[in-house]
């Protein structure tokens, strides 16, 4: 698969913002899957600056930690602070997985998602589908991998505060999207990105499932 290497983080953010802008212009009633983490911060900032019309858009987040949604480090808080509170989207159109995983799946299955934006973990995870996740997996409660807990420790005061469980869309759920964009930022992601996009398609490297999708764009900057 082609990994498009971009000049810097700004170009990465602008390139994916262009894709989102085009999607919303072509189809105001778009359904999007959105990620959290450090990688999409520049994208969200750029989308806010562009003042697009989000009034008919539905969003579905990839995953949440199992923790109080009002906690400063929850993914619900992250999305509100970085995007939802700054655009004209209806709060009721911003969906997050919860323990009623069946209901989340039903909402997603109703009409296919138009565009899914993903990051990748250093262990090859997409959303919180850790290595070994089934390619058929759907939304479910998961235990986080030791590597992911380490990677996320930078956001918490102490390792003991980091949630160890999450609710994530499954790999099967993600693959149902019509279009997928994967963003990766930083040299520490380059090796896993190459392995996932051009190595063996295996459940040991969850992101490798994207090789089986016919509309994926992969963007990288160091
Ligand atoms: P990051 O996380 O954007 O914070 O690097 C990506 C991921 O783990 O999916």
Image (cartoon, helix red, strand yellow):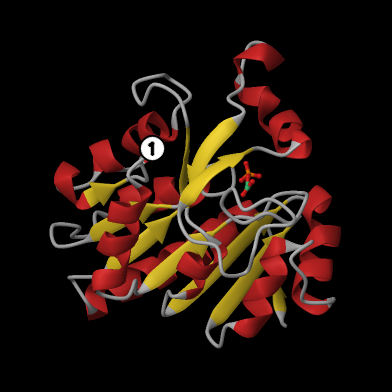
Write the residue at 52% across / 57% down: 13
Instruction: Indicate the quadrant where residue 10 lies.
Output: bottom right
The answer to whether residue 182 of the structure is visible from this angle is yes
Residue 20, placed above or below residue 159: below
Write the residue at 66% across / 58% down: 133
157 sits left or right of 76 in the view: right
Q: Is the CB atom of the residue marked by disc 1 within 8 angstroms of ligand 1's nearest atom?
A: no
Instruction: Indicate the quadrant where residue 156 lies.
Output: top right
* Residue 119 position within the rendered picture, expressed as x and y whole percent measured from the top left: 60, 55
* Residue 209 position within the rendered picture, expressed as x and y whole percent measured from the top left: 66, 73
Write the residue at 57% across / 69% down: 136
* Residue 49 position within the rendered picture, expressed as x and y whole percent measured from the top left: 33, 49
The answer to whether residue 41 of the structure is visible from this angle is no
Q: Estimate how packed mark 1 is, as few (under 14), some (14 to 19) or many (20 or more) residues with alpha carbons within 10 Å.
A: some
Q: Quadrant of the N terminus?
A: bottom right
| Residue hosting label 1 | 82
Q: Quadrant of the C terminus?
A: bottom right
Question: Viewer-proximal residue, 192 or 46?
Answer: 192
Question: Viewer-proximal residue, 38 or 63?
Answer: 63
104 sits left or right of 57 in the view: right
Question: Viewer-proximal residue, 23 or 116?
Answer: 116
Residue 169, placed above or below residue 86: below
* Residue 115 position within the rendered picture, expressed as x and y whole percent measured from the top left: 40, 71
Instruction: Indicate the quadrant where residue 159 lies.
Output: top right
Q: Secondary structure at mark 1?
A: helix
């Amino acid at each position: 698969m082609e990994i498009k290497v971009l000049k810097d983080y700004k170009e990465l953010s602008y390139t994916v913002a262009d894709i989102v802008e085009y999607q919303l212009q072509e189809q105001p009633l778009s359904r999007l899957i959105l990620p959290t983490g450090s990688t999409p911060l520049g994208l969200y900032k750029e989308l806010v600056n562009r003042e697009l019309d989000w009034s008919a858009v539905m969003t579905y987040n990839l995953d949440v930690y199992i923790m109080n949604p009002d906690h400063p480090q929850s993914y619900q808080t992250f999305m509100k602070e970085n995007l939802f509170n700054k655009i004209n989207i209806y709060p009721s159109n911003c969906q997050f997985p919860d323990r009623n995983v069946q209901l989340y799946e039903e909402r997603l299955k109703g009409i296919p998602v138009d565009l899914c934006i993903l990051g990748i973990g250093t262990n090859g995870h997409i959303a919180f589908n850790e290595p070994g996740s089934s390619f058929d997996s759907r939304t479910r409660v998961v235990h986080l991998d030791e590597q992911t807990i380490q990677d996320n420790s930078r956001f918490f005061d102490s390792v003991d505060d980091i949630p160890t469980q999450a609710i994530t869309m499954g790999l099967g759920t993600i693959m149902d999207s019509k279009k997928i964009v994967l963003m990766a930022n930083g040299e520490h992601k380059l090796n896993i990105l190459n392995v996932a996009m051009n190595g063996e398609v295996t459940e040991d490297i969850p992101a490798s499932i994207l090789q089986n999708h016919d509309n994926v764009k992969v963007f990288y900057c160091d």
